[in-house]
Image: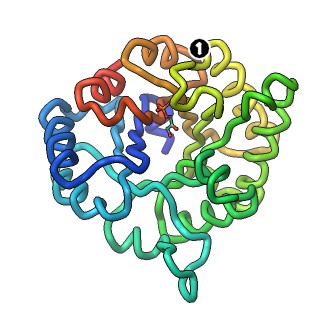
Amino acid sequence: MSDLLRGKLVVGNWKMNGGGAANAVLLAGVVAGWQARADREVVVCVPFPYLAQARDALAATPIAWGAQDVSGHAAGAHTGQVSAGMLAEFGCRYVLVGHSERRQECGETDAVVAAKAVAARREGLIPVVCVGETLAERDAGQWQAVVTRQVDAVVQRLGADSARAVLAYEPVWAIGTGRTATPQQAQEVHAHLRALLCSAGGPEVPMLYGGSVKAANAGALFAQADVDGALVGGASLDAAEFLAIAGA
Ligand code: 13P
C-alpha cells in the first residue's frame, strides 16, 4: 500500500448505473485509453451483476476492479448480502465500504461499516472506507467530530490491518451536487485524518477525496500534500473524463 502513497489511486464508483451494452462501451474505452503507469492505480467499482463483465473486460489490463459493498457477516442466513469470501473468490481486489449513500439509505452505522471493513480484510480485499460530514454537520462546525468518529470506529476494529485499507473523504454536501470541496478544504480534512492516525500510532494509508471530482478540478486536488487520489462518481461513467482524472 505504501506504493500508493507515492502515486495516486483513482477509483471509479459507478453507483447503481450501467447495463450490459453501456458497460461494454465504457470498459472498452477505459482499457483503450489507459496505459500502465507506476505512479497510478486505476480501479472501477461496479454493481454486483456486472462484476463478471468487469473481470472479463479488465483481465490482463492495468485496471483493477471491485465491488461497492460487502456483508459484515462471513456466511449464513443473510438474504441478499454478498460475503467478502465470495468477492475474493471471484477475484475482486477492492471493495467500497460505508459509502454515505449506504449509511443514509441503508442505515449503516459506524459499527456496521467497521464490521464490513474487518470482513473485507479477513479475505484479503482492500476496503475503501468512506467517511464524510453532511452540510448541516459542516455548518454546525462538526466536521472534525464526525469524521474522527467514523474513522476511529474502523481503525479500532482493524488495528494494524488498517495499513491495508484506503480512506476516502467524501463530504456528503459535495456528492453529485457539482459543489466540490475546495482543495484547501479537502487538504484540511485529510491532514486532520492523517494526524489522527499518526497520533494513534496508526499506519499511513492512502486518502482519497470524493465529491464532484472532474478532470477540471482533479489536478488542484491532487496537488494537495495529503490527497492521494480520488473516488469518482458521475465522472467515472465517461471513459475520457475518468481517464483525464486518472492522468491528472
Ligand atoms: P460524484 O463524483 O458524482 O459527486 O460522486 C462522488 C461519490 O460519491 C463517489 O463515491
**Residue at the image position 65 percent from the left and 28 percent from the top:** 173
**Residue at the image position 25 percent from the left and 52 percent from the top:** 19
Position of residue 151 relative to residue 94, above or below, is above
Provide residue 24's location: percent of width, then percent of height.
Answer: 16, 48
Position of residue 118 relative to residue 191, above or below, is below
Left or right: residue 117 versus residue 243 is right
Provide residue 21's location: percent of width, then percent of height.
Answer: 15, 50
Q: What type is the residue that disc 1 sits on?
A: Pro
Q: Quadrant of the C terminus?
A: top left
User: At numbered mark 1, what does the secondary structure look like: helix, strand or loop?
Assistant: helix
**Residue at the image position 49 percent from the left and 11 percent from the top:** 220
Left or right: residue 105 versus residue 188 is left
**Colour mode?**
rainbow
Which of the 4 image quadrants contains residue 198? top right
Residue that badge 1 annotates: 183
- Nearest the camera: 220 or 14? 14
Left or right: residue 194 versus residue 246 is right
How many labels, in total? 1
- Nearest the camera: 158 or 182? 182
Confirm or reject: label 1 Cβ below 8 Å from ligand 1. Answer: no
Left or right: residue 171 versus residue 243 is right
Provide residue 199's location: percent of width, then percent of height.
Answer: 81, 38
Q: Sort mark 1 into few (<14), some (14-19) or many (20+) by Cα contacts within 10 Å.
A: some
Provide residue 231's location: percent of width, then percent of height.
Answer: 48, 36
**Residue at the image position 32 percent from the left and 64 percent from the top:** 49
Position of residue 144 relative to residue 61, above or below, is above
- Nearest the camera: 62 or 21? 21
Position of residue 239 relative to residue 18, above or below, is above
